[in-house]
Image (spheres, rainbow, N blue to C red):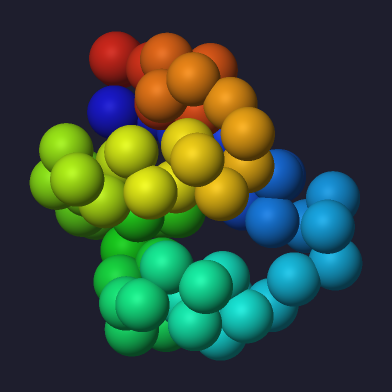
């Protein structure tokens, strides 16, 4: 699954740790999602979308 998480995070000037803290996950989880090694659970995907004020589909796209 492709995602725009790294770009969205960078636009806000947040580090991976900043984003992880806001999402209540580890920095390693953020890194794994950004690099496509891990697909977030549906509840986490909703938290990410809510944090950025976007729809899930605008952040995550199928390969």
Q: Quadrant of the N terminus?
A: top left
* Closest to the observer, 43 or 28: 43
Residue 49: x and y, percent? 47, 37
In this image, 14 relative to 43: left or right? right
Q: Quadrant of the C terminus?
A: top left
Q: Is residue 60 visible?
A: yes
**Residue drawn at (33%, 38%), measured in percent from left and top?**
46
Residue 15: x and y, percent? 69, 77
Q: Image quarter for residue 28?
A: bottom left
Q: Give above or below for 54 relative to 58.
A: below
Q: Give above or below for 34 relative to 55.
A: below
Residue 10: x and y, percent? 78, 57
Q: Is residue 28 visible?
A: no
Q: Give above or below for 14 relative to 57.
A: below
Q: Image quarter for residue 57?
A: top left
**Residue drawn at (58%, 26%), measured in percent from left and top?**
54
Residue 48: x and y, percent? 44, 47
**Residue drawn at (32%, 63%), measured in percent from left and top?**
32
* Closest to the observer, 14 or 32: 14
Count the labels in the image: 0
């Amino acid at each position: 699954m492709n995602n725009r998480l790294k770009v969205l995070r960078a636009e806000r000037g947040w580090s991976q740790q900043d984003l992880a803290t806001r999402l209540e996950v580890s920095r390693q989880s953020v890194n794994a999602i950004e690099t496509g090694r891990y697909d977030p659970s549906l509840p986490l995907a909703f938290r990410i979308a809510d944090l950025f004020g976007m729809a899930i589909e605008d952040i995550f796209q199928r390969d």
